[in-house]
Amino acid sequence: MNHVNPNREGHLKRIQATIARMPSLSTTAVRVLEACNDPQASANDLQRVISLDPVLTGRVLKLINSAYFALGQPITSLTRAIIMLGINTVKNLALSFAILKNMKGSGSFHAFTTDEFWLHCLGVGVVAKSLAGLKGLSPAEQEAYFVAGLLHDLGKLPLNKQFPEEYFRVCQSSGKEHDPFRLSEDRMLGIDHCKVGAMIARRWRLGVSLVETLSHHHQPDDSTENSRDLVSTISLANQIAIELKIGTAGDCISDKAMLDQLTDRVGVDYGILGDFHQSVCGEIEKARIFLEIVQK
Amino acid sequence: MRIKFWGVRGSIPSPGPNTVKYGGNTLCLELRLQDQGRLIIIDAGSGIRELGDRLSFSKNAKDPLNTEIFLTHTHLDHILGLPFFAPIHNPRTRLKIYGPVTCEEDPLEDVIGGQLSYRYFPLRQHELGASIEYIDLKEGNFDIGQGVTLITKYLNHPLLTLGYRIEYGNKAICTAYDTEPFYNLFCTDPSDPSYDEFLASEGDGAVKDENRRMEAFFKDADLLIHDGQYTQTEYDSGKRGWGHSPIEYVIAAARRANVKRLAICHHDPMRTDSQLDELSQLFCNEGIEGDKVIFFAREGQEVKV
């Protein structure tokens, strides 16, 4: 039986506690540990492995943006963050979170598996980067779009970790009744993943564009004009990933009206979906091979 | 402002017959704002022991002592002298200790206090006599009272490390150690299998920006105290990435930034007095040592700004 949870304050406290110590994903943890424990690991290896992990990418950006608050402009480039922080600092940061994950375990993933969630995030990142390429954006902007896509669903992790049973029911309800996912979250938990995502992005000082992406990727019209291109593109990439069934983050049904509207707005042809399927699967396969090489 | 170098050596205290002239103590600087008698200490390497003895036991010692210590970072050679700094055992001492946080975001008190435990030292942190307040610093611009402005800047070292720029009465003293020039960490060789064109060019852009920011940090400083542990040849022979600078680069950067005087410090523990004299002949201007525009800092040396 669905119900509005009366203890919203208590929920918020639990969510904030998870945000403060958010564990990394088990899919990438082994590779992260391997790369960070290898004194010979190159910056290219490190960039690659971190860019496959939404939590770790977020933590690196959090460190750079909170430490370097004098910069004025938030840094959303993982590549730049690695140059500024140095390999050792990034490795130490990555290791501390990978270890935390191992201690905590990943048993709370009932609603969707860690691998499915990782695939969805990576898929949205890869599609967003491809869309940015089609729009003629620079390689640095394409990286920013990839990062925004990779991080867009971070808000689901604290909800899934703190309320695994309720979240499982949210996912079931959304799958059966074509019930908008965020409304189910709000009805059963008193908060949705977009609001939690905004909390994370603000707390981690990820900058306005990422706050808006995590907050408005289901309603890009609510974003400010400065961020609307980015948020609309991530929103479209999300719908494409759902439509193409690239992993899942609980929300399994794409919004056709939104897909039509966003393809128009972003300025791409609906027919590109077929092309995307092949190229995105190719990218994801490469990422899988990269992760599995070490797990053997 | 007046600076006195109580320790100029890097990495580990290096006493012995080969380090008598330049000194073997690790880094510690005493900064006096003479017209207000304010004392600021930068780093607590082994050099801080003698400074502490002078503050506690000399004829002119003032009790109570009320001072600030700014730690550039928490590598051992920059904090190992703190337990032997006599004033911390005096209940009338008031200390503020500033320093950067680590990437794990542990508070400075825990990081510094870690060496004040029975396994390393006979006293625990809470058994010290002095009242100590720890203040975590990040990059920024701070008014630290009495007309003194503190500007902090992250350097390039394997641990988050802050450079300090202290401005007072139209004069500026800057510290930039331990650090090395930012360089592209990503593969830039197109024939290497791991080469990625975007990473290589983005890395180049970030390096240029960061090295420019570094020079802006010490621009027009009246005195820059900079890491110069290696010669360029040594740096190029496997020392890149260790977080210390080649002397030639530092001199060129200081000139570009219109620095008035440059003190090179964090001397390698293997560097002998005669080698430092030779480097001094090679790199420093002629004239009386105290007036030199570029000089290799020496323990006990005082410089007025």
Image (cartoon, rainbow, N blue to C red):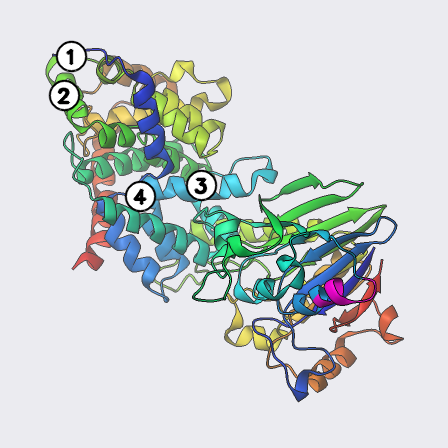
Confirm whether residue A253 shows in the render. Answer: yes
Q: Chain of mark 2?
A: A
Q: Is B59 contained in the magenta span? A: yes
Where in the figure is residue A280, as x and y percent of width and height?
A: 24, 38
Choose mark 2 or mark 4, whichever is in front. 2
Of marks 4 and 3, which one's residue comes earlier in the chain? 4
Q: Residues within 10 Å of mark 3 (few under 14, many from 20)?
A: many
Q: Which residue is mark 4?
A: A53
Q: Which residue is mark 3?
A: A61
Where in the figure is residue B236, as x and y percent of width and height?
A: 55, 73
Of marks 4 and 1, which one's residue comes earlier in the chain? 1
Query: Which residue type carries mark 1?
Result: Asn
Main secondary structure along the magenta-highlighted residues: helix
Confirm whether residue A128 shows in the render. Answer: no
Q: Is residue B235 above or below residue A179?
A: below
Choose mark 3 or mark 1, whichever is in front. 1
What range is drawn magenta here? B53-60
3D distance between C-alphas at marks 2 and 1: 9 Å
Q: Residues within 10 Å of mark 4 (few under 14, many from 20)?
A: many
3D distance between C-alphas at marks 2 and 3: 32 Å
Quarter of the image for the C terminus of chain B: give it.
bottom right
Report whether mark 2 lies on the same chain as mark 1: yes
Q: Is residue B104 left or right of residue A123?
A: right
Of marks 2 and 1, which one's residue comes earlier in the chain? 1
Quarter of the image for the N terminus of chain B: give it.
bottom right
